[in-house]
Image (spheres, rainbow, N blue to C red):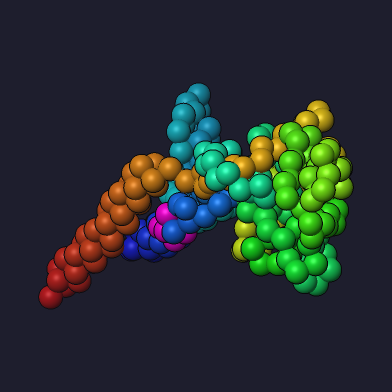
Amino acid sequence: MRSIYIAATGMDCQQINMDVIANNLANVNTTGFKRSRADFQDLLYQVIRPAGVNQTQGTEIPTGIAIGYGSRPAAVQKLFTSGDFKPTQQDLDLAIEGDGFFQVQVPDGTTAYTRAGAFKTDSQGRIVTSDGNPLLPNINIPNDTIDIVIGTDGTISVLQQGQTEGTVIGQIQLTQFLNPSGLKALGHNLFQPTTASGTPQTGVPGETGFGTISQGYLEMSNVSMVEELVNMIVGQRAYEINSRVIRTADSMLGTAVSIRQ
């Protein structure tokens, strides 16, 4: 009974689909999170009769007989559409309007990339993520700073005690990729490049191809709860239908066995 194995592949796919949906919903309030989408494809076919063969002289079979063997997961793709912006009124909360990623240094010394702009300062005055990963290039906020202004081009100016004018202390750079969906998700809102993502291209915010910086805002998750709930209902029904195919095929097999009895 081929149908039993075919339906089982469909159930496996819907289980993966449900896992992806569950992860999306779990991160609906995660800053800078990008939702994922599971893509599927059909398996190989058993060709019983090929199309186009000659049945008799002068006649041609227009359609053949090919039985598919089910489905399998082809990819789980990250969708890097922008999320909504949430005002926070915090000086080091930054959002990217457009394309680009912030660069941060992870503990092993390599560079990772993120869209989550909830930055803070550590004991050394460095701008860091919530996990303590410093922003690249390194920018240190002076201890006597009373105000921080970050321009749309990433220029950081500080007003120190006793001064009447701000001082430029650095500029944030952004990185973009030809294929951001090819990035490797590390968790902690971090990504690393792969051969599929392409070579990192670094530039100044506002330049051609790069987004601009909005100070005092955070980019929220791009997960749509309504869309995910609809996908969950569709996936649940598909799972139920495939399980019913297995029960029906089992019943048919039982009927075939009972004929001999």
- Position in image of residue 230 (x %, y %): 34, 44
- In the rendered structure, which segment of residues is drawn in magenta? 18-25
- In the rendered image, the residue lying farthest to the top is 58
The quarter holding residue 208 reads top right
Q: Is residue 20 magenta?
A: yes
- In the rendered image, the residue lying farthest to the bottom is 261
Towards the viewer: 88 or 5: 88
Relative horizontal placement of residue 85, taking residue 69 as reference (left or right): right
- Position in image of residue 195 (x %, y %): 79, 53
- Give the residue drawn at x 75%, y 36%: 151
Residue 128 sits above or below residue 123 on the image: above
Towards the viewer: 72 or 108: 108
- Asked whether residue 163 is in view, the answer is yes
- Position in image of residue 143 (x %, y %): 79, 60
The mark total stands at 0
- Give the residue drawn at x 44%, y 59%: 26
- Asked whether residue 2 is in view, the answer is no
- Give the residue drawn at x 72%, y 46%: 147
